[in-house]
Image: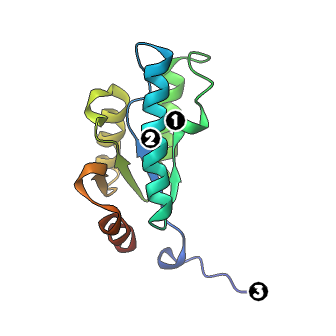
Amino acid sequence: MYVNNSRSSRCRVIYVAGPFRGKTPWDVEKNIRRAEELAFRVANAGAMPLCPHTMTRYFDKQCTDEFWLAGTLELLERCDAIILTANWEQSTGARGEYDRAGALNLPALIETAVNDEELAAWIRLL
């Protein structure tokens, strides 16, 4: 069986970035839910979201911040683009992810910049 592994035929993977930490457990949960909602928009638009918030939501404070930040940057390097929650600039980690995406020449988009139809069109152009 022939599998076409060209870039044009594979599913795009979009990294979802935004604040994780918060002053209270509820603040953390709200940040996770915001990222999760954006990840769902990405999926509905036709790409596979990579949302570290949801992958590690119960691991908070189990490892060092350095471990989590290094790991998320490694995940980002394997993605086709980054999308950021509206409040991404409040997060040191998300700002670092945005900077790293720029260094990797990954396309970046802020969730509030587009509606769902425009998001789907952006993904098709990747």
Report how far apart the C-alphas of labels 3 and 1 lie in the structure.
37 Å
Which quadrant of the view contains residue 107? bottom left
Q: Is residue 26 above or below residue 85?
A: above
Closer mark to the observer between disc 3 and disc 2: 2
Q: Looking at the rendered structure, which numbered label has been put on residue 35?
A: 2
Q: Is residue 93 left or right of residue 51?
A: left
Q: Earlier in the sequence, mark 3 or mark 2?
A: 3
Q: Position of residue 5 (x, y in %)?
A: 59, 76
Mark 1: few/some/many CA within 10 Å (<14, 14-19, 20+):
many
- Which residue is situated farthest in the bottom direction here? 1
Residue at 51% x, 41% y is 74
Closer mark to the observer between disc 3 and disc 1: 1
The residue beneath circle 1 is 53
Q: Earlier in the sequence, mark 3 or mark 1?
A: 3
Q: Looking at the rendered structure, which numbered label has been put on residue 1?
A: 3
**Foreground of the two, 60 or 103:** 60
Q: Looking at the rendered structure, which numbered label has been put on residue 67?
A: none
Which element type, helix, strand or loop, lies under badge 1?
helix
Is the C-beta separation of discs 2 and 1 under 8 Å?
Answer: yes
Q: Is residue 73 above or below residue 125?
A: above
Q: Position of residue 31 (x, y in %)?
A: 43, 31
- Say what amino acid the circle numbered 1 marks: His
Q: Position of residue 97 (x, y in %)?
A: 37, 39
Q: Is residue 79 visible?
A: no
Q: Position of residue 105 (x, y in %)?
A: 31, 55
Is the C-beta separation of discs 3 and 1 under 8 Å?
Answer: no
Which element type, helix, strand or loop, lies under badge 2?
helix
- Which residue is situated farthest in the left direction here? 113
Which element type, helix, strand or loop, lies under badge 3?
loop
Residue at 76% x, 86% y is 1
Mark 2: few/some/many CA within 10 Å (<14, 14-19, 20+):
many
